[in-house]
C-alpha cells in the first residue's frame, strides 16, 4: 500500500497567496489630522492602608484631550507635575488643587503648552507611598486604510 504526502503545505501556501493578493491593494496610511478630543479618567484610589494609587498609572494622550482625575478616596489627593518634556510651558498647571471629597474632579487639558513626550506626576503628600503616574503626549495621527 502506498501513501502520498499530506496536502497541508500546498493548501497553506495557496491560502497565503490568496491572502496576499486580497491585502495587496489595501495599505495603511498615516496622516496628520484631527479627531474629536477625548476625556481619559484617572481614579485616585486607596488600595489598602498606606497604598494609594492613580489608576491607571500610565496613559497616552494627544493634544486637545482632557485627563480627568477623580477623587475616589476620603484622604485628600492632588496632582503635581514633577517632570515635563523640554519645551513645555506649563507652569500654570504644575500643581493641581487638593481634592477633598468623594467625586471631586480635576481636569487637566493637554494643550499645545505640553511638548510631546512623557509627563511624570505625583500626589504630593503620598509620593513616598508610590502614588505617581505618567502621561505620554503623542503627535495627533490618524490611521485609515485605502483601496
Image: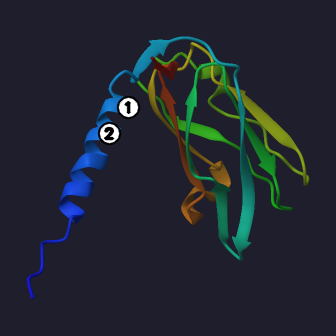
Q: Do labels 2 and 1 touch, CB within 8 Å? A: yes
User: In the image shown, does 146 or 141 lie closer to the viewer?
Assistant: 146
Q: Is residue 42 left or right of residue 2?
A: right
Describe the colour scheme in one phrase: rainbow
Q: Quadrant of the C terminus?
A: top left
Image: 144 above or below 18: above
**In 3D space, how far apart are the residues under numbered discs 2 and 1 (Cα atoms)?**
6 Å
What residue does disc 2 label?
A: 18
Measured from the top left, where is residue 89 in percent x and y?
Answer: 54, 15
Q: Quadrant of the N terminus?
A: bottom left
Measured from the top left, where is residue 29 in percent x and y?
Answer: 41, 18
Residue at x 79% of width, y 36% of height: 106
User: In the image shown, does 42 or 5 lie closer to the viewer?
Assistant: 5
Q: Say which element carries label 2.
A: helix
User: In the image shown, does 85 or 34 lie closer to the viewer?
Assistant: 34
Identify the mark at residue 14; answer none if there is no mark.
none
Q: Residue furthest bottom?
A: 1
Residue at x 45% of width, y 23% of height: 116
Q: Residue furthest front?
A: 1
Give the image quarter of residue 117: top left
Q: Say which element carries label 1.
A: helix
What residue does disc 1 label?
A: 22
Residue at x 83% of width, y 46% of height: 99
Measured from the top left, where is residue 134 in percent x and y?
Answer: 52, 43
Image: 5 above or below 145: below
Amino acid at each position: 500500500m502506498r501513501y502520498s504526502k499530506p496536502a497541508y503545505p500546498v493548501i497553506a501556501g495557496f491560502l497565503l497567496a490568496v491572502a496576499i493578493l486580497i491585502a495587496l491593494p489595501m495599505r495603511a496610511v498615516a496622516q496628520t489630522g484631527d479627531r474629536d478630543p477625548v476625556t481619559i479618567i484617572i481614579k485616585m484610589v486607596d488600595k489598602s492602608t498606606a497604598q494609594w494609587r492613580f489608576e491607571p498609572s500610565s496613559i497616552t494622550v494627544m493634544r486637545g484631550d482632557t485627563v480627568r482625575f477623580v477623587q475616589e478616596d476620603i484622604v485628600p489627593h492632588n496632582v503635581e507635575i514633577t517632570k515635563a518634556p523640554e519645551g513645555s510651558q506649563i507652569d500654570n498647571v504644575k500643581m493641581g488643587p487638593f481634592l477633598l471629597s468623594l467625586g471631586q474632579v480635576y481636569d487637566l487639558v493637554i494643550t499645545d503648552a505640553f511638548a510631546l513626550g512623557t509627563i511624570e506626576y505625583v500626589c504630593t503628600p503620598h509620593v513616598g507611598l508610590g502614588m505617581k503616574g505618567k502621561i505620554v503626549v503623542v503627535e495627533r495621527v490618524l490611521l485609515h486604510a485605502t483601496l
